[in-house]
Image (spheres, rainbow, N blue to C red):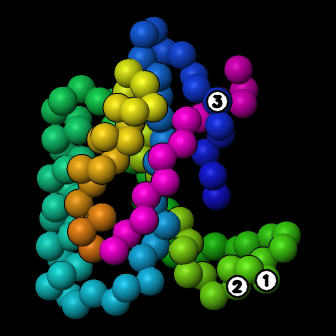
Amino acid sequence: MHCEKRLREAGHEKIICFHIPQSTRKRSEGEQKRRTDEVRAWALQQIDEGRGLDPRILDDESVRLGDTSASSTGEGSVIALNFIQAADFSEAVAIARTHPGLRYGVDIEVRPWTDPRK
Protein backbone atom coordinates (compact mmCIF):
# COMPACT_ATOMS: atom_id res chain seq x y z
CA MET A 1 0.00 0.00 0.00
CA HIS A 2 1.49 3.32 -1.01
CA CYS A 3 0.32 6.89 -0.95
CA GLU A 4 0.11 8.76 -4.23
CA LYS A 5 3.37 10.35 -5.35
CA ARG A 6 2.37 13.93 -6.20
CA LEU A 7 1.98 16.85 -3.80
CA ARG A 8 -1.47 18.32 -3.33
CA GLU A 9 -1.48 22.05 -2.78
CA ALA A 10 -3.72 23.14 0.09
CA GLY A 11 -3.25 26.86 0.34
CA HIS A 12 0.44 27.25 1.13
CA GLU A 13 0.73 23.88 2.80
CA LYS A 14 1.45 20.51 1.33
CA ILE A 15 -0.32 17.46 2.68
CA ILE A 16 1.99 14.51 3.22
CA CYS A 17 1.18 10.92 4.08
CA PHE A 18 3.40 8.47 5.84
CA HIS A 19 2.41 4.88 6.23
CA ILE A 20 3.58 2.60 8.95
CA PRO A 21 4.29 -1.04 8.13
CA GLN A 22 3.85 -3.48 10.97
CA SER A 23 7.08 -4.26 12.76
CA THR A 24 8.25 -7.87 12.73
CA ARG A 25 9.82 -7.34 16.16
CA LYS A 26 7.92 -9.01 19.00
CA ARG A 27 7.07 -6.75 21.94
CA SER A 28 6.06 -7.58 25.50
CA GLU A 29 2.63 -6.50 26.67
CA GLY A 30 4.21 -3.69 28.71
CA GLU A 31 6.30 -2.50 25.77
CA GLN A 32 3.24 -2.55 23.51
CA LYS A 33 1.30 -0.45 26.04
CA ARG A 34 4.17 2.06 26.30
CA ARG A 35 4.34 2.31 22.51
CA THR A 36 0.57 2.85 22.28
CA ASP A 37 0.69 5.55 24.98
CA GLU A 38 3.65 7.29 23.32
CA VAL A 39 2.02 7.21 19.88
CA ARG A 40 -1.21 8.63 21.33
CA ALA A 41 0.74 11.46 23.01
CA TRP A 42 2.63 12.11 19.74
CA ALA A 43 -0.64 12.29 17.80
CA LEU A 44 -2.16 14.75 20.28
CA GLN A 45 0.99 16.89 20.02
CA GLN A 46 0.69 16.96 16.21
CA ILE A 47 -2.95 18.05 16.52
CA ASP A 48 -2.06 20.70 19.13
CA GLU A 49 0.67 22.03 16.81
CA GLY A 50 -1.88 22.45 14.01
CA ARG A 51 -0.45 19.84 11.66
CA GLY A 52 -3.87 18.59 10.63
CA LEU A 53 -3.06 15.02 11.63
CA ASP A 54 -5.60 12.67 10.07
CA PRO A 55 -4.61 9.14 11.16
CA ARG A 56 -6.04 5.86 9.90
CA ILE A 57 -5.42 2.67 11.87
CA LEU A 58 -5.98 -0.34 9.64
CA ASP A 59 -7.67 -3.53 10.78
CA ASP A 60 -5.83 -6.86 10.85
CA GLU A 61 -8.15 -8.37 8.23
CA SER A 62 -6.74 -8.00 4.74
CA VAL A 63 -6.47 -9.66 1.37
CA ARG A 64 -3.49 -9.18 -0.93
CA LEU A 65 -4.19 -9.39 -4.63
CA GLY A 66 -1.78 -9.63 -7.52
CA ASP A 67 1.75 -10.93 -7.10
CA THR A 68 1.76 -11.71 -3.39
CA SER A 69 4.64 -14.16 -3.47
CA ALA A 70 7.10 -11.57 -2.16
CA SER A 71 5.05 -10.78 0.94
CA SER A 72 2.79 -13.75 1.64
CA THR A 73 3.81 -13.88 5.31
CA GLY A 74 2.12 -10.58 6.18
CA GLU A 75 5.39 -9.15 7.43
CA GLY A 76 5.64 -5.49 6.64
CA SER A 77 1.90 -5.12 6.33
CA VAL A 78 0.76 -1.54 6.63
CA ILE A 79 -0.97 -0.96 9.97
CA ALA A 80 -1.53 2.80 9.83
CA LEU A 81 -1.68 5.76 7.49
CA ASN A 82 -1.06 9.24 8.87
CA PHE A 83 -1.89 12.31 6.83
CA ILE A 84 -0.26 15.53 8.04
CA GLN A 85 0.15 19.07 6.81
CA ALA A 86 3.72 20.15 6.24
CA ALA A 87 5.32 23.09 4.47
CA ASP A 88 7.35 20.72 2.29
CA PHE A 89 8.68 17.20 2.05
CA SER A 90 11.68 17.93 4.32
CA GLU A 91 9.39 19.13 7.10
CA ALA A 92 7.23 16.02 6.70
CA VAL A 93 10.32 13.83 7.08
CA ALA A 94 11.37 15.79 10.17
CA ILE A 95 7.91 15.27 11.68
CA ALA A 96 7.99 11.54 10.85
CA ARG A 97 11.37 11.23 12.57
CA THR A 98 9.69 12.22 15.84
CA HIS A 99 7.21 9.32 15.65
CA PRO A 100 7.75 7.11 18.73
CA GLY A 101 7.19 3.92 16.77
CA LEU A 102 10.73 4.26 15.41
CA ARG A 103 12.06 3.40 18.88
CA TYR A 104 10.04 0.17 18.77
CA GLY A 105 11.29 -1.17 15.45
CA VAL A 106 8.58 0.33 13.24
CA ASP A 107 9.58 1.49 9.75
CA ILE A 108 7.97 4.66 8.43
CA GLU A 109 7.76 5.64 4.79
CA VAL A 110 7.01 9.29 3.99
CA ARG A 111 5.24 9.94 0.69
CA PRO A 112 3.47 12.90 -0.88
CA TRP A 113 -0.07 12.12 -2.04
CA THR A 114 -2.92 13.53 -4.08
CA ASP A 115 -6.65 13.00 -4.20
CA PRO A 116 -7.34 11.11 -7.46
CA ARG A 117 -10.86 12.60 -7.61
CA LYS A 118 -9.42 16.05 -8.33
Residue 98 x, y percent position in the rendering: 24, 50
Which span of residues is magenta-colored? 105-118
Q: Residue at x 20, y 88 (%)?
A: 29
- Amino acid type, residue under disc 1 in the picture: Ser
Q: Can you tell which quarter of the image residue 25 is in?
A: bottom left
**Label 3 or label 2, whichever comes before in sequence order:** 3
Reply above or below: 9 against 24: above
Q: Residue at x 45, y 32 (%)?
A: 89
Residue 33 x, y percent position in the rendering: 18, 76
Check disc 3 and report the residue beneath it: 6
Label 2 SS: loop
Give the label on residue 8, or none.
none
**Label 1 or label 3, whichever comes before in sequence order:** 3
Q: Is residue 114 magenta?
A: yes
Give the label on residue 69, or none.
1
Give the label on residue 72, or none.
2
Label 1 SS: helix
Q: Are marks 1 and 2 in contact (CB under 8 Å)?
A: yes
Q: Are marks 3 and 2 in contact (CB under 8 Å)?
A: no
| Distance in Å between CA atoms under marks 1 and 2 | 5 Å
- Amino acid type, residue under disc 2 in the picture: Ser
Q: Is residue 62 left or right of residue 26?
A: right
Q: Quadrant of the C terminus?
A: top right
Label 2: few (<14), some or many (≥20) within 10 Å? Answer: few
Q: Is residue 43 left or right of residue 53?
A: left
Q: Residue furthest right?
A: 66
